[in-house]
């Protein structure tokens, strides 16, 4: 089946899968966003415990999606894996350390004799929420603004700044995306609290906070999108593979891929509808609208970054070192083999959805917190 | 084109990877085994309906949760370090190596992370049988993830199922099944997972023994010992069998590693196996400190030949045969391999130059030559040797490999005795009176970790200098980065992991002290 597809079609198929994984990851950062809110929404110890427990039962999904995202990128676009991870050393390690701290914090927070104390593990969760979203968003910003690297004839990376990727924060457009992801994750976190916790105080505080987080989200999101459609982009000549700067490249990508533009618009509407229905129509299920909207928006942005003859990981230092889905991908054989493996994804998603529903059938309340034998 | 990285950069990058891998491997084996032990215990609960089995299951589940969290924390660093610190490697073999990592994420990690949440929080949310299924799937998911990462590791030890593509300057996969079912990979998986089963069984027996010594939780302890001893005994027999199989694979595929684990310098027919030995403190070869000999050794005649080739009189090559060559037995000298490797690298450079200058005809001719079977079998096969400056660099640290191997094997046999005695005493219901045995069981817990770490030292130190056997030495695989950056992250991880390990141990000891919830 897959072996009969052209290399380009397989490359596009895998970029779509990468886009889906990236989109699911950003959706799942509701865990990170929620972690940054444990002190402002949880005013008593019990409330805080409820917040941490509702997030704690999902933290591994975000974590696993990040790991799978890395693995899938490695398998399908190994040159990106080698270039970005090997090049932007400090950015990736900052992100990874934030996730290391998260992995132990839920389990160790309330355990007796935990060496560092409950407060420290809570701060670790906050750090993970901050760095895990802002830095990932900023790093993805380089997909549109370029990074400082060059590749030699063996495709070995040379990074051109001693900051090894941290210089991305000097480009405000990258930071705008980082902050967009940060505030979006907080919005998702708040909607998740409202959706899963049966506690009036938490719901009331979450709604209030939702309003405060939506404004900065909109500001940064609009800043990012407007600058994106107005800026020059990294285009690829499909015949020669040469990379060149094209005015309004990303605007062209939006216009020339109308289905993707529709996905983007529907996604934005979904994100806003989730917030509006929660704030003004007393809906408790805004999480699903904003969540689904997030998946669509992020997916569409990945498509804009990589499709329509665009370099998805451009080099601002040496244009011809830029990575495209064609020059960075695995071989036809590997993509074919991996495509067969990808047929398992719907099955994996199905059991995740089934058990997610089973676990979330009943809202979390104080009674459950006091009776639960395994508590975060 | 040949860029040899600064050796201190290579050493620090190796140190960082070793640090992360060794920390990760402190926690992984327990997860691999204890999830099955818990699944057996919960099965007994579901079958018998007895609440005490539920209590026992939940107790071990608590300890598993503490261990699991830090295992996950160290694991994420390990996966991304292939990119951050070994980016040249990641491109050179990413077409093959990336696939198992992706499959691991898609098929195993999601299974593990979905069902572990049900395992811990689903007692009142799903049916008894569904919960039991989730526990079993957590165990299977954990062991499946081990399969994929060990397939990846096995491929590094014995690269198969690929061809070198000069256009992309990398190896590309040609046969997925060859990679997945490579005997080296399967051996590694079976041996590593069964070592995890043994470690977990010892963990359960050791902690249970402590309870009996303290005259606490007697029923929990005895029942736990019974389950763990049966599981441990079966696993340890299997472990020895897979270990024996691994030895033959190594002897055939990585003869230098085999020579190192046996401290064999001069090969011979009917070679004896050194059951125990102490290396001389003086160097018999002043140039290379790895050329040491034994001060004392206990040798079993002909046994090494049989272990390696199932033939009591077979020739087993030693370090000298592999470095200097041995024409009689068909071992090529390392210097010749280096020459051939240099030719392969030079040919690739000429091809790249021709492409760059637009000389398509010359490029195509060279490409055909590079891709020909003759060139692949006689030159490209030794590609990695082209980076080697000195033949002595091809010798791993022999004392470290030798001692690690022998410690691992000796402890492996000791654990069989432990399981037999545990089973015997618990069946005869005399275990509470065997205080010496209970103490022995407790001491065995750290010993199991020593054996487990020693196994990986054998596997990884023994194959140096290769990151991919014969194709890429570590010095060519490393990311080109300032050594100071790697030193900084090394110490950062050393501090973070050590602090988290201390926290983990403190929590674990406290939970053991608290015991099961009544």
Image (spheres, coloured by chain):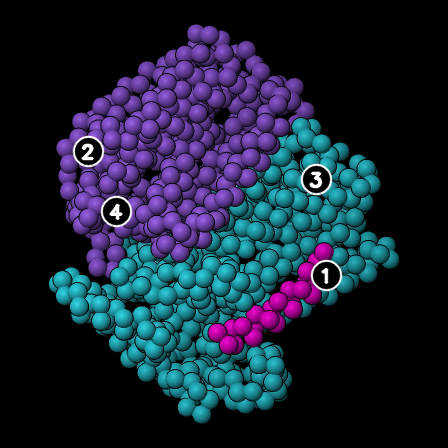
Chain colours: A purple, B cyan
Q: Which chain carries label 3?
A: B
Q: Is residue A300 visible?
A: yes
How dense is the environment of label 3, judged by Cα within 10 Å: few (below 14), some, or many (20 and up)? Answer: many
Give the labeled residue for mark 1. B233
Marks 1 and 4 in Cβ contact (< 8 Å): no
Point out the tag, 1 or 3, that comes first from the N-terminus.
Answer: 3
How dense is the environment of label 2, judged by Cα within 10 Å: few (below 14), some, or many (20 and up)? Answer: many
Q: In the rendering, which numbered label is found on residue A323?
A: 4
In magenta, the rendered stretch is: B231-253
Give the labeled residue for mark 2. A249
Q: Closer to the camera: disc 3 or disc 4?
A: 4
- Choose between B263 and B109: the one closer to the eye: B109
Q: Is residue B507 above or below residue A34?
A: below
Q: Distance between the residues labelled 1 and 2?
A: 65 Å
Residue A131 in the image: state x and y as whole percent: 36, 34
Q: Which chain carries label 1?
A: B
Q: In the rendering, which numbered label is found on residue B392?
A: none
Q: Assign the magenta stretch its main secondary structure.
A: helix
Asked if residue B190 lies in the magenta stretch, the reply is no
């Amino acid at each position: 089946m897959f072996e009969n597809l052209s290399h380009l079609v397989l490359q596009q198929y895998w970029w779509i899968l990468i886009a889906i994984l990236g989109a699911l990851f950003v959706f799942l950062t509701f865990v990170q966003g929620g972690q940054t809110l444990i002190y402002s929404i949880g005013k008593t110890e019990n409330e805080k415990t409820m917040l941490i427990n509702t997030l704690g039962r999902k933290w591994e999904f975000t974590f696993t999606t990040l790991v799978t995202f890395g693995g899938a990128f490695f398998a399908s676009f190994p040159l990106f894996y080698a270039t970005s991870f090997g090049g932007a050393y400090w950015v990736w390690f900052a992100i990874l350390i934030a996730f290391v701290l998260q992995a132990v914090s839920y389990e160790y927070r309330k355990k007796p004799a935990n060496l560092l104390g409950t407060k420290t593990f809570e701060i670790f969760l906050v750090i993970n929420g901050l760095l895990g979203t802002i830095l990932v968003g900023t790093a993805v910003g380089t997909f549109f603004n370029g990074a400082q690297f060059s590749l030699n004839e063996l495709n070995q990376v040379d990074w051109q700044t001693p900051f090894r990727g941290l210089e991305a924060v000097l480009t405000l457009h990258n930071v705008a995306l980082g902050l967009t992801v940060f505030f979006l994750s907080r919005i998702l976190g708040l909607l998740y609290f409202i959706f899963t916790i049966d506690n009036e105080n938490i719901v009331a505080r979450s709604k209030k906070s939702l309003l405060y987080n939506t404004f900065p989200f909109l500001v940064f999101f609009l800043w990012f999108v407007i600058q994106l459609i107005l800026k020059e982009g990294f285009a690829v000549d499909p015949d020669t593979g040469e990379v060149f700067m094209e005015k309004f490249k990303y605007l062209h990508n939006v216009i020339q891929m109308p289905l993707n533009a529709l996905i983007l618009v529907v996604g934005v509407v979904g994100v806003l509808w989730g917030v509006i229905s929660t704030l003004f129509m007393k809906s408790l299920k805004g999480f699903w609208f904003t969540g689904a909207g997030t998946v669509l928006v992020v997916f569409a942005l990945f498509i804009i970054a990589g499709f329509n003859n665009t370099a998805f990981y451009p080099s601002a230092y040496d244009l011809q070192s830029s990575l495209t889905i064609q020059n960075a991908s695995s071989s036809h054989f590997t993509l074919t083999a991996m495509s067969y493996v990808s047929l398992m994804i719907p099955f994996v998603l199905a059991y995740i959805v089934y058990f997610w529903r089973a676990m979330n059938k009943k809202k979390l309340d104080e009674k459950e917190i006091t009776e639960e034998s395994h508590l975060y | 084109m040949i860029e040899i990285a600064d050796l201190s950069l290579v050493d620090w990058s190796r140190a960082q990877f070793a640090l992360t891998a060794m920390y990760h491997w402190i926690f992984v084996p327990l997860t691999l085994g204890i999830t099955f032990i818990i699944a057996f215990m919960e099965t007994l609960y579901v079958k018998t309906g007895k609440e005490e089995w539920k209590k026992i299951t939940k107790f071990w589940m608590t300890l598993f949760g503490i261990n699991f969290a830090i295992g996950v924390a160290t694991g994420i660093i390990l996966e991304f370090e292939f990119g951050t610190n070994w980016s040249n490697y990641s491109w050179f073999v990413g077409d093959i190596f990336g696939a198992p990592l992706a499959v691991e994420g898609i098929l195993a990690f999601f299974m593990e992370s979905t069902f572990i949440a049900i395992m811990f929080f689903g007692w009142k949310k799903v049916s008894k049988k569904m919960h039991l299924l989730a526990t079993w799937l957590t165990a299977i998911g954990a062991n499946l993830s081990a399969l994929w990462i060990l397939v990846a590791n096995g491929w590094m030890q014995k690269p198969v199922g690929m061809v070198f593509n000069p256009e992309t300057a990398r190896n590309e996969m040609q046969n997925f099944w060859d990679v997945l079912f490579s005997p080296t990979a399967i051996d590694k998986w079976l041996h590593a997972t069964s070592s995890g089963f043994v470690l977990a069984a010892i963990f359960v027996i050791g902690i249970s023994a402590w309870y009996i010594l303290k005259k606490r939780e007697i029923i929990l302890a005895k029942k736990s010992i019974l389950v763990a001893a049966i599981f441990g005994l079966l696993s340890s027999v299997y472990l020895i069998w897979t270990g024996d199989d691994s030895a033959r694979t190594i002897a055939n595929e990585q003869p230098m590693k085999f020579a190192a684990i046996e401290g064999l310098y001069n090969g011979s027919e009917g070679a004896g196996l050194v059951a125990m030995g102490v290396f001389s403190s003086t160097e018999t070869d002043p140039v290379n400190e790895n050329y040491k000999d034994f001060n004392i050794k206990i040798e079993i005649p002909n046994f090494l030949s049989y272990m390696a080739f199932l033939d009591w009189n077979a020739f087993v090559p030693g370090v000298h045969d592999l470095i200097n060559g041995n024409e009689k037995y068909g071992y090529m000298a390392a210097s010749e391999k280096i020459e051939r490797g240099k030719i392969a690298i030079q040919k690739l450079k000429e091809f790249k130059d021709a492409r760059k200058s637009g000389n398509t005809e010359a490029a195509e001719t060279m490409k055909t030559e590079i891709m020909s079977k003759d060139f692949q079998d006689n030159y490209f096969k030794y590609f990695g040797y082209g980076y080697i400056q000195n033949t002595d660099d091809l010798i791993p640290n022999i004392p470290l490999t030798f001692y690690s191997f022998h410690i691992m094997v000796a402890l492996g046999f000791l654990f069989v005795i432990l399981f037999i005695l545990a089973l015997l005493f618990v069946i005869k219901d005399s275990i509470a009176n065997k205080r010496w045995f209970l103490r022995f069981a407790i001491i065995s817990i750290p010993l199991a970790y020593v054996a487990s770490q020693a196994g990986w030292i054998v596997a990884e130190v023994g194959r140096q200098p290769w990151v991919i056997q014969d194709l890429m030495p570590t010095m060519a695989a490393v990311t080109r980065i300032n050594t100071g950056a790697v030193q900084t992250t090394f110490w950062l991880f050393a501090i973070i992991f050590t602090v988290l390990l201390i926290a983990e141990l403190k929590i674990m000891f406290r939970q053991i002290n608290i015991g099961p919830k009544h």
